[in-house]
Image (cartoon, rainbow, N blue to C red):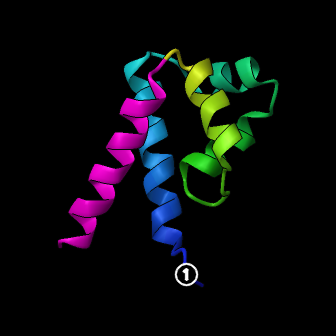
Amino acid sequence: MWVKPRDHKLVGESLATVRKRAGITQQELAKRLRKPQSFVSSFESGQRRIDLLEFFLIVEALGADPRKTFSDIATRRRARRNL
C-alpha cells in the first residue's frame, strides 16, 4: 500500500481540529453534510478515506479555508515524517 493508514489519520486529525476550532460537534457537522455522525467519526479517526471533493465539502461545511486546512495536513505530515 503506497498510502499509509497514518496519512489518512493525519487528514482526519486536521479536519477534527478545524471542526473543534469552529465550535461544531460531530453531530452538527454530520447534519450539515446530510450524513450520519458515524461518517464524521470514521474520517476523523482515519478509518475512512475521503476524496478531494469530499474534503472541499467538509471544509466548506465548517466555514474554513481549504488552502489553510490542506496546508495544515502537509505540515503535520512533514512533522511526522521527520520524527
Q: Residue at x 80, y 34 (%)?
A: 36
Residue type for callout 1: Trp
Magenta part, dominant SS: helix
The residue indicated by pointer 1 is 2
User: Residue 47, percent across and down?
Assistant: 63, 61
Residue visible at 21% across and 61% down?
79
Q: Residue at (42%, 41%) from the top-left corner?
A: 70
Q: Is residue 66 above or below residue 28?
A: below
- Give yes or no for residue 35 being in the magenta stretch: no
Residue range corresponding to the magenta coloring: 64-83
From the top left corner, tell me how far across and down residue 49 is, in percent.
Answer: 66, 57
8 lies left or right of 13 = right
Q: Residue at x 68, y 50 (%)?
A: 51
Is 30 left or right of 16, judged from the image as shown? right
**40 displayed left or right of 81:** right
* Residue 82 in picture, x, y percent from top left: 18, 71
From this viewpoint, which residue is outermost toward the bottom? Answer: 1
Whether residue 17 is visible: no
SS of the residue under disc 1 = loop
Residue 78, compared with residue 30, is above or below; it is: below
Question: Dot 1: within a 10 Å radius of its alpha carbon, few (fewer than 14), some, or many (20 or more) residues?
Answer: few
Q: Residue most toward the left?
A: 83
Determine which quarter of the picture holds residue 56: top right
Residue 15 visible within the image: yes
Check the picture and name the quadrant holding the N terminus: bottom right
Residue 72 falls within the magenta-colored stretch:
yes
Is residue 48 left or right of 11 when viewed as pictured?
Answer: right
**From what the image shows, is residue 30 above or below residue 51?**
above
**In which quadrant of the rendered view does residue 2 lie?**
bottom right
